Image (spheres, rainbow, N blue to C red):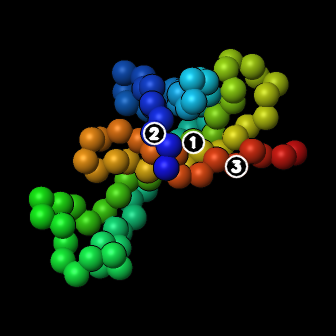
Amino acid sequence: MEYVVVKTAQDGSPTAVVSNGREWAVGADAVRWFERVSWWEAQRRMPKGLGRVDVEVLQVQVRLGHNPHSALTTMVLERDGLGGGWRLREAVVDVA
């Protein structure tokens, strides 16, 4: 998964996502949820030091740059539990 930078407002809400050197402005309210980490599928024991069992997921609808006419793209981001950054899980261009 590709690492991305999520820019936020003072209240913590995302305002932009920087991916591959391009800035995508958030065009709608973000949706945040948590998913259970299936660590048991890859390992016999929970990794040492990994006290969490959930991963934070953020879904944002973004537009390339500040162009109000660019198509909305839905990005699903996953929080990196080790460094605290975000990784791009999926990006889908909305076709109207």
**Disc 3 and disc 1: Cα gap in Å?**
11 Å
In whole angstroms, how far apart are the C-alphas of marks 3 and 2? Answer: 17 Å
For mark 2, give the secondary structure: strand
Q: Nearer the viewer, residue 25 or 44?
A: 44
Residue 64, percent from left and from top: 69, 26
Q: Earlier in the sequence, mark 2 or mark 1?
A: 2
Mark 3 residue crowding within 10 angstroms, few (<14) / some (14–19) / many (20+): few
Q: Which mark is residue 92?
A: 3
Q: Residue at x 37, y 21 (%)?
A: 10
Which residue occupies 68% across, 18% down?
66
Q: Amino acid at mark 3?
A: Val
The local crowd at label 2, few if under 14, some if 14 to 19, many if 20 or more residues have their Cα within 10 Å, is some
Identified by mark 2, the residue type is Tyr
- Disc number lying in front (2 or 1): 2
Instruction: Give residue 70's quadrant in the image.
Output: top right
Q: Residue furthest top?
A: 66
Residue 49 position within the rendered picture, expressed as x and y whole percent measured from the top left: 12, 59
Amino acid type, callout 1: Val
Residue 16's place in the image compared with 49, above or below, is above
The residue indicated by pointer 1 is: 60
Spot the residue most to the right. 96
Camera-nearest residue between 20 and 7: 20
Question: Of residues 17 and 11, which is closer to you in this image?
Answer: 17
Q: Earlier in the sequence, mark 3 or mark 1?
A: 1
Residue 58 in view (yes/no): no
Label 3 or label 1, whichever lies nearer to me, is 3
Q: Position of residue 45 (x, y in %)?
A: 18, 77
Q: Which mark is residue 3?
A: 2
Q: Does dot 3 land on a helix, a strand or a loop?
A: strand
Q: Which residue is found at the position 35% from the left and 79% from the top?
A: 41
Residue at left offset 64%, top offset 47% = 91
